[in-house]
Amino acid sequence: MTIRIPLTLPENSYEILIAPGCLKQIGTEISSLKIGKKVLVVSNPEIFSHYGETVLTSLESAGFEPSTHLIPAGEAYKTLDSISKIYDTALDYRLERSSAMLALGGGVIGDMTGFAAATWLRGINFVQVPTSLLAMVDASIGGKTGVNHPDGKNLIGAFYQPRLVLLDPDVLKTLPDREFKAGMAEIIKYGVIWDKELFQQLESAPDISDYDSIDPGLLQTIITKSCQAKADVVSKDEKEAGLRAILNYGHTIAHAVESQTGYTSINHGEAVAMGMVAAGKLAVKLGMWTQEEATRQENLIAKAGLETSLPLLDTQSVLHTLTTDKKVKDGKVRFILPTEIGAVTISDAVTPELIKEILETDI
Ligand code: GLY
């Protein structure tokens, strides 16, 4: 079944297309955008070995002249140096204003390709084809693009919306199990912050822990509901002036976990899962959320095969990381806290003492 979710913005609205097998239709879909013939496909070698040929063939059949730029996989390559290399290829192939860059990969490829597209010739067409569950439901939607600075993740970037996001759930069959679970953490997040029914569907499903065990129909439904949640939020607050911050539920502690553990042993989704459990505990301690619902959240995270406890962290360093996070406002750490399943609030009531308590007593 083909689903098209509109993401409506004052300027640059676009569609999120979700359909198993739609990678083969990519050329036709891009044709409807009325862009020039040149399309630079940016990917990493592994993803490209699985899906590159399908994408290039589909583009060629639709009359496009695709070229390719590959970047080694991994966060370590999410740098300005990699962007510079994309520009070199763009120059070699003489990409024009009417041309497009197409990101075929996970969040790292999507963020970098978006930033290169935003800046090449002051902005050319950009298409997102996410291949990880996490990129499908989060990173590919909403126009956050950028790279890391040696001193911090995503410090350099731009809001730049794609012309189209094309999701083919079939590509998840080659995604490692661990990354599938990481994406499921963000799906659970949408259930807690926005969509109670999504949460309940995940709760009542027999198994959500990996691609082979989850019902394919349910997988498409939960991807669709997550994309719809993200589209709803972004369309109300494109540049994160307010509401969009709720998408960072679980991310405040998650960023501290990631930075303390060196971004390697614990991946982003795993850190978000732990961060959501910690935020849930904070909300319960502040009397904002019931213990019963916090337990339901924790059980669902465990059901997805994700760790719910924080690793042992250095409290002082965590507090330092939290107060220097780019989302800190007027020196206050703002937490997104659940008030009921399907609803959150933005709070600055969390004190350093309370954070210390969560870090030191609840592991
Ligand atoms: N990943 C959070 C956002 O797109 O705002």
Image (cartoon, rainbow, N blue to C red):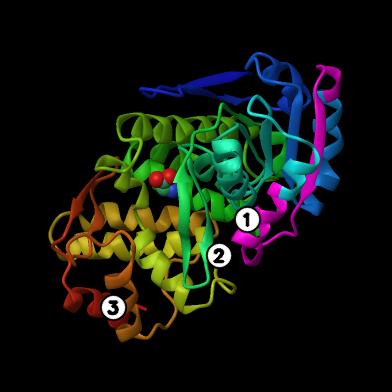
Picture disc at residue 179: 1
Q: CA distance from mark 1 to mark 2?
A: 8 Å
Is residue 21 shown above or below 363?
A: above
In front: 241, or 79?
79
In front: 94, or 250?
94
Give the residue displayed 34% in from the left and 78% down from the top.
318
- Magenta highlight range: 60-87
Picture disc at residue 309: none
Identity of the amino acid at label 2?
Answer: Asn
Identity of the amino acid at label 1?
Answer: Glu
Is residue 63 shown above or below 329?
A: above
Q: CA distance from mark 1 to mark 3?
A: 28 Å
Comparing labels 1 and 3, the label whose residue is closer to the camera: 3
Membership of 308 in magenta stretch: no
Identify residue for label 2: 267
Membership of 67 in magenta stretch: yes
Q: Are marks 2 and 3 in contact (CB under 8 Å)?
A: no
Identify residue for label 3: 319
How crowded pointer 3 is (Cα within 10 Å; few <14, some 14-19, many 20+) is rated as some
- Percent across and percent down for residue 177 are 67, 55
How crowded pointer 2 is (Cα within 10 Å; few <14, some 14-19, many 20+) is rated as some
Give the position of the N terminus as an image quadrant: top right
Q: Are marks 1 and 2 in contact (CB under 8 Å)?
A: yes
Give the residue displayed 67% in from the left and 62% down from the top.
74
From where the camera sits, is residue 134 visible? yes
Q: Helix or strand or loop: what does disc 3 sit on?
A: helix
Q: Quadrant of residue 240?
A: top left
How crowded pointer 1 is (Cα within 10 Å; few <14, some 14-19, many 20+) is rated as some
Q: Mark 1 vs ligand 1: CB under 8 Å? A: no
Identity of the amino acid at label 3?
Answer: Leu
Give the residue displayed 56% in from the left and 42% down from the top.
119
